Amino acid sequence: MTNHALRPVDALFTSGVRENPVPVYRALHAGGPVHRLNDEWVVVCGYAEADEVLRSPVFQVKDSAFRERTRPGWIAAHPSAAMIGDSVIRARAPHHERVRRLLSRPLTSRRVAGLREAALGHTRRLLDGLAERAAGGGPVDFVDGFAYPLPIALICELLGVPAGDRGWFRDRATDLSYVLEPAGRERDLSRADAAASGLMEYFAGLVGERRARPEQDLISSLVQVSDADAGAGADANADADGARLGERELVVNLVLMLAAGFETTASLLANGLGVLLDRPADRDRIARDPAAAAACVQEVLRHDPPAQVTDRWATEDTALGGMRIAEGTQVLVLLGAANRDPRRFSDPDVFDPGRPAGPSLSFGAGPHFCLGSALARMEAEVAFHELFARFPAMALAGTPSRTDRLALRGYASLPVTLG
């Protein structure tokens, strides 16, 4: 239960609010777009203010240098924090622009276009599997049977992870994501550290294999822009300005692409179904019209996004939402709350796929806008269209269970009958 004696900004970090943060978001909006948590932190819930933080060069991501300055020894003690700190999501300019450009380079239009057919094939195979499990009319868990396996299959196919290894990744990538929680618990950080070490070792080995025997996959393409093999002909594989990916850069970002490529998309699928189970008219439109699927995915991203929180820090004295922000202040950006700002969205708590198109902040904004946003949207659009065309009478079959996290919001289980 939520402790209603707490300030809304403090209540964010309680278990009851992690289960359902929307009432706290509503209370925060009533008190203004920016709230002071303590002397070191402010919390941003307003859409315009969150967008400003994500775009302004005054507010920067917390790279490893910042973490070492504010929490000496923490990076060295936690391999998961070191891995995330060295990845593109924690990189600052100009390093960030170089790494992002190199990671984006192999994602050609032809490769991305081919992913839609792959998504369709994997979706239909998984729907066949759900039908087999539910042949006796009993319930199936949508999370285990579909929401996780689909993005795992697709991101592993894109990267070039062998099919036999794919089942190994789910728990490890989920454990790794705990390092992103704003108030990480020590037991969760221990799990994240073990996952980071195992994933780094796996991808270092796979990079070595692809360097020796390239294939038609993303890892092989990214190996070509790594500086680890700077032998004959390597200059032809460098970026136009000679920039390369270092070996550690390559491995940490492969781990990140794997984890981000399915953890958030799995939650997008489950969160979307959680809303749409109570909306038969929307399900019918999605089954008939792929364009309706796109509109519903857009509204799911606004209404119940997988990524609820990110953070930045102020590199100089500034002002935000009428509040003075001192240099060094850490800023917790509530993406989920910004997406429900009544100053930006009318009736923000109402799920309305027909509302006028407008960008949510679910994939961020500015230089760190999510590289995989188009892939996640495409997967969800294909999945929902096929899902409701195949099982129009799908219904909830028990009590769903939410994950006990604030930064990444999703379901641990979502039991359904297929009808």
Image: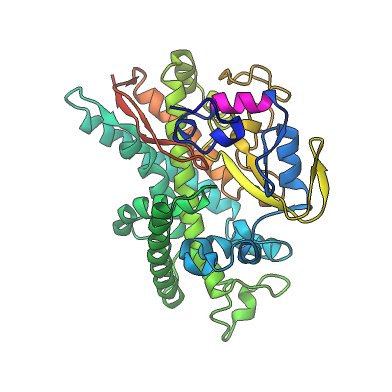
Residue 351, quarter of picture? top right
Relative to 235, 5 lies left or right: left
209 w.r.t. 18: above or below: below
Q: Is residue 221 visible?
A: no
Q: Nearer the viewer, residue 354 or 66?
A: 66
Residue 190, quarter of picture? bottom left
Residue lying farthest to the left in this orientation: 136
* x and y, in percent, of residue 118 in the image: 43, 45
Measuring 43% from the left and 16% from the top, which residue is drawn there?
278
* x and y, in percent, of residue 122 in the image: 37, 42
Measuring 30% from the left and 37% from the top, which residue is drawn there?
145
* x and y, in percent, of residue 237 in the image: 61, 74
Q: Does residue 23 show up magenta in the picture?
A: yes
Q: Main secondary structure of the magenta part?
A: helix
Task: Specify the segment rendered in magenta.
Answer: 22-29
287 w.r.t. 228: above or below: above
For the rendered model, the colour scheme is rainbow
* x and y, in percent, of residue 298 in the image: 58, 30
Residue lying farthest to the front in this orientation: 5
Residue lying farthest to the bottom in this orientation: 232
How many numbered badges does the structure rendering display? 0
Locate the N terminus by quadrant. top left
Residue 384, quarter of picture? top left
Q: Nearer the viewer, residue 348 or 128?
A: 348
Measuring 43% from the left and 71% from the top, which residue is drawn there?
204
Q: Is residue 98 visible?
A: yes
Q: Does residue 237 show up magenta in the picture?
A: no
Locate the C terminus by quadrant. top left
